[in-house]
Image (tube, rainbow, N blue to C red):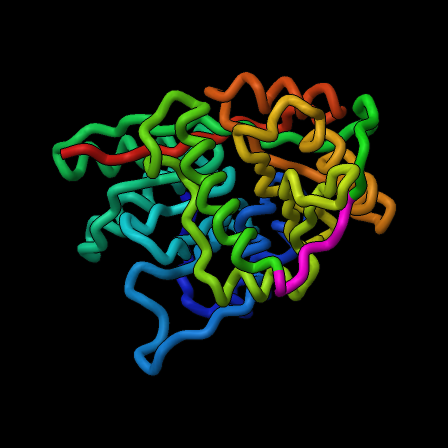
């Protein structure tokens, strides 16, 4: 049987699970990026719905990991691959301590097992909200070239970045056939966006006149893996190949710096899946976001 270790200390979590996460750093990218992200808490400390999870087998070896770090309700869990009994045990542990859990994200089948058990315990039902797919870049295939160039975003661009990131979240829902605001992403606040800009995590594609026409972001490499996100072009500027060229150039630079490169797609958005496949991104694992309905 698996045993669970919950902690609110990211350093403690990484000390226990770091080798396990580093063994498959592409699949663990969401958890590792969050565990390495700087956080500041008010005097009361982290919110109740916040923890890191280490899963061990009977011999004490780490066989799974997860987190609950989302700042906005419903504070979904995020589970990496783990034994089936561990995914069920997570649901039971949260239920026993009265921790309301209305959403579970992560790798399959762990997320499905956990969500199903939570639904059973609460008399509700688990429903898939979004199917996602994690891809890793294989051989980069350059898209047809377009006029313009990639340029790093600066703090002076914060107003435009803020508008475009917010628009990206809503447009991603619409393109996948969902109502705006029902997706998986949470809008970063202005201070967080400025921090990311300061760390060089955002780029514009500038057209031939030097005007920003597309935005691409990427996480800093953790365990040698960087993840591309978000990618956004305003609707009236789409169809010119700017996003494809921007993603290709960002991907090339990350790889040239020694990183493996990955990204997520929404399986309900055939346009983005087609674009990234054409660039050389190949599927790694399917994930899903569940909601618990009562």
Give the magenta part as a residue range. Answer: 150-156
Coordinates of residue 228 in the picture (x, y in percent): 65, 42
Residue 193 as seen in the image, left or right of residue 71: right
Q: Residue at x 35, y 26 (%)?
A: 178
Q: Is residue 16 visible?
A: no
Residue 64 as seen in the image, left or right of residue 150: left
Quadrant where the N terminus is found in the figure: top left
As drawn, 174 above or below 44: above
Q: Residue at x 46, y 41 (%)?
A: 167
**Which residue is situated farthest in the bottom direction here?**
43
Q: Residue at x 56, y 64 (%)?
A: 194
Coordinates of residue 31 in the picture (x, y in percent): 53, 51
Q: Residue at x 36, y 70 (%)?
A: 46
Quadrant where the C terminus is found in the figure: top left
**Which residue is situated farthest in the front direction here?**
209
Residue 287 as seen in the image, left or right of residue 87: right
Which residue is nearer to you in this view: 177 or 89?
177
**Which residue is situated farthest in the right direction here?**
256
């Amino acid at each position: 049987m698996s045993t669970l270790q919950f902690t609110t200390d990211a350093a403690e979590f990484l000390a226990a699970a770091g080798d396990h996460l580093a063994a498959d750093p592409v699949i663990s990218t969401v958890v590792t990026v969050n565990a390495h992200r700087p956080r500041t808490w008010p005097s009361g400390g982290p919110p109740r719905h916040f923890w890191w999870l280490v899963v061990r087998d009977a011999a004490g070896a780490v066989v799974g990991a997860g987190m609950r770090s989302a700042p906005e309700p419903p504070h979904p869990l995020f589970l990496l691959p783990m034994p089936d009994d561990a995914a069920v045990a997570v649901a039971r542990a949260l239920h026993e301590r009265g921790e309301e859990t209305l959403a579970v994200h992560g790798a399959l089948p762990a997320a499905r097992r956990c969500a199903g058990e939570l639904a059973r315990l609460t008399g509700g039902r688990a429903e898939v909200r979004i199917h996602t797919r994690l891809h890793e870049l294989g051989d980069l295939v350059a898209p047809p070239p377009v006029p313009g160039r990639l340029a790093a975003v600066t703090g002076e661009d914060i107003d435009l970045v803020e508008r475009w990131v917010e628009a990206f979240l809503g447009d991603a829902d619409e393109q996948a056939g969902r109502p705006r605001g029902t997706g998986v992403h949470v809008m970063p606040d202005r201070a967080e966006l400025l921090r990311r800009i300061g760390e060089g995590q955002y780029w514009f594609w500038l057209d031939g006149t030097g005007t920003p026409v597309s935005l691409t972001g990427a996480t800093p490499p953790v365990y040698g893996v960087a993840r591309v996100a978000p990618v956004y072009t305003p609707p009236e500027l789409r169809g010119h190949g700017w996003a494809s060229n921007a993603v290709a150039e960002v991907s090339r630079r990350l790889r040239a710096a020694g990183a493996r490169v990955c990204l997520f797609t929404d399986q309900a958005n055939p346009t983005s899946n087609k674009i990234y496949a054409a660039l050389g991104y190949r599927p790694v694992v399917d994930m899903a976001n569940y909601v618990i309905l009562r």
